[in-house]
Amino acid sequence: MKWFPARWQRSVQMLFSPQQPHRCHSIATFSGFVFAMAGRSVRVLVGVALLIPGMAVAQQPLRHIEGSAIDLSTVIQKASLIVRGRVTKSETRWVGRTIFTFHELNVSETVKGARNRKVTVAVAGGSIGNVQTTWPGSPTIVAGDELVFFGVLAPDSQSYSAVGLFDGLVKVHEQSNSGQLYVLPRGQPEPVEDFLNEVRSIHSFPR
């Protein structure tokens, strides 16, 4: 850590001090820091934040290994909103000291929760000016992407954050040869309609 400024070294040492275990729980767990000072640009690789003032990203992932199967029943139970929709636009902005990207979804189906034509999804991470934050496990989402979204209302009451940090963000993919739409929430491709039928069934008849 010699390349950290002295005050950063003290802060990081305090954050991970075994005598202060509550700090990691109540502030954040950092998986790494990368500072690229050339051109005064800063890139920060952060881990799973458990408490961010003003946003309900304060959730622990529901799975321990990225790419492993989500617990669909648990995700459905925890979600107050389940929709299928397409991203029409995205905007990044600061929320406290954290960058969030806000994606607007044009909703095509509502499985659970309030029925709205449009829903704003807040995802931790993004870039503003010369600062970029990257969260391990965060999917790349751009305008035109289709999602099956499992969310909870954020404290601002204007947007939703995904259940389990990123578990509730299920991207819809298209096979290049057949055009079939599929999702990968459990590590293996499955047709999106089969997945949605299972979601509808579990929501209607909880296990």
Image (cartoon, rainbow, N blue to C red):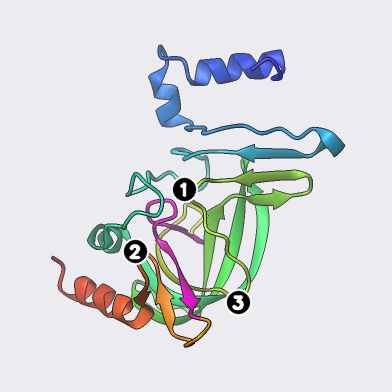
Where is mark 2, residue-wise? Answer: 80
Q: Nearer the N terminus, badge 1 or badge 3?
A: 1
Magenta stretch holds residue 113: no
Give the residues drawn in magenta, as a range: 159-175
Considering only vertical position in the picture, is 129 above or below 108? Answer: above
As drawn, which residue projects farthest toward the right?
39
* Image quadrant where one finds the N terminus: top right
Mark 1: which secondary structure? loop
- The three-letter amino acid code for the residue at tag 3 is Gly
Mark 2: which secondary structure? loop
| Disc on res. 57 | 1
Residue at 27% x, 80% y is: 197
Where is mark 3, residue-wise? Answer: 144
Mark 3: which secondary structure? loop
Residue 125 % position (x, y): 59, 49
Residue at 45% x, 23% y is: 23
Q: Nearer the N terminus, badge 2 or badge 3?
A: 2
- The three-letter amino acid code for the residue at tag 2 is Ser
Considering only vertical position in the picture, is 74 above or below 17? Answer: below
Total numbered badges shown on the rendered structure: 3
Considering only vertical position in the picture, is 63 above or below 173? Answer: above
Residue 206 % position (x, y): 16, 68
Residue at 23% x, 72% y is: 203
Q: Is residue 87 left or right of residue 202?
A: right
Residue 28 % position (x, y): 48, 33
Quarter occupied by residue 80 = bottom left
- The three-letter amino acid code for the residue at tag 1 is Val
As drawn, which residue projects farthest toward the front?
177
